[in-house]
Image (cartoon, grey):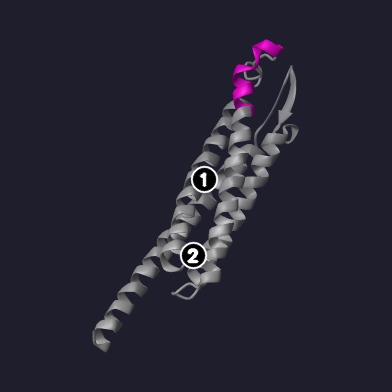
Amino acid sequence: MDKTDQTAIDESALVLNRTEKSAEAVLRVASMALSITGLVIMIKNSISNEFGSVSYSNIGAFMYLVSANGVCAAYSLLSALAILALPCPISKVQVRTLFLLDQVVTYVVLAAGAVSAETVYLAYYGNIPITWSSACDSYGSFCHNALISVVFTFVVSLLYMLLSLISSYRLFTRFEAP
């Protein structure tokens, strides 16, 4: 293989790397937007009626959901900017760092969605054996908004699962095992 062939291969790899980075940045920005949407819906979610008032801040699972979505949105923005700003052949340390942080954010957001989904389920259906009745009969709009926020959170967790797959693929195909 002569020098011009090697240069052509390097340039095509560079273009692929730039395309890959752009696609990854788009996924990160999309997850940021969805995290912020879920966060705002939950923060604005409060209701007051003759039975009392309820807000996301009264329920620990929803406070965790808001916190996790906030952390995810901030990380998504910073990582999207970092992905675009990093030089084209990304170093092993940078790839490992992104892989690790993507894994952490994926599990944090998934845990927030799971615990909030359980809370929404209990609010909708109660738990008859221990005499918890459905709260959504009295606080319907609160439950509906909480459900929408949880759905957004699960979509974000799916995007981060995809980003984790991309990070792991990049790490394990380009570098040898430690």
From the viewer's perspective, is residue 26 above or below residue 46? Answer: below
100 lies left or right of 163: right
Magenta stretch in the rendered image? 119-131
| Residue 176: x %, y % from top left | 46, 68
Residue on which the image places disc 1: 156
**Residue 127 lies within the magenta run:** yes
Q: Residue at coordinates 57% horizontally, 42% vertically from top-left?
A: 110
From the viewer's perspective, is residue 49 above or below residue 15? Answer: above
Q: Amino acid at mark 1?
A: Val
Q: Looking at this view, is 131 or 55 the one in front?
A: 131
| Residue 101: x %, y % from top left | 58, 57
The reply to whether discs 2 and 1 touch (Cβ–Cβ < 8 Å) is no
Q: Looking at this view, is 172 or 114 the one in front?
A: 172
Number of the front mark, 2 or 1: 2
- On the question of residue 138 being in view, the answer is yes
Q: Residue at coordinates 48% horizontally, 44% vertically from top-left?
A: 158
Q: Residue at coordinates 41% horizontally, 64% vertically from top-left?
A: 173
Quadrant assignment, res 137: top right
| Residue 134: x %, y % from top left | 64, 16
Quadrant assignment, res 61: top right
128 lies left or right of 77: right
Q: Amino acid at mark 2?
A: Ala
How many numbered marks does the figure carry? 2
Spatial CA distance of label 2 from label 1 is: 29 Å
Q: Residue at coordinates 39% horizontally, 69% vertically from top-left?
A: 18
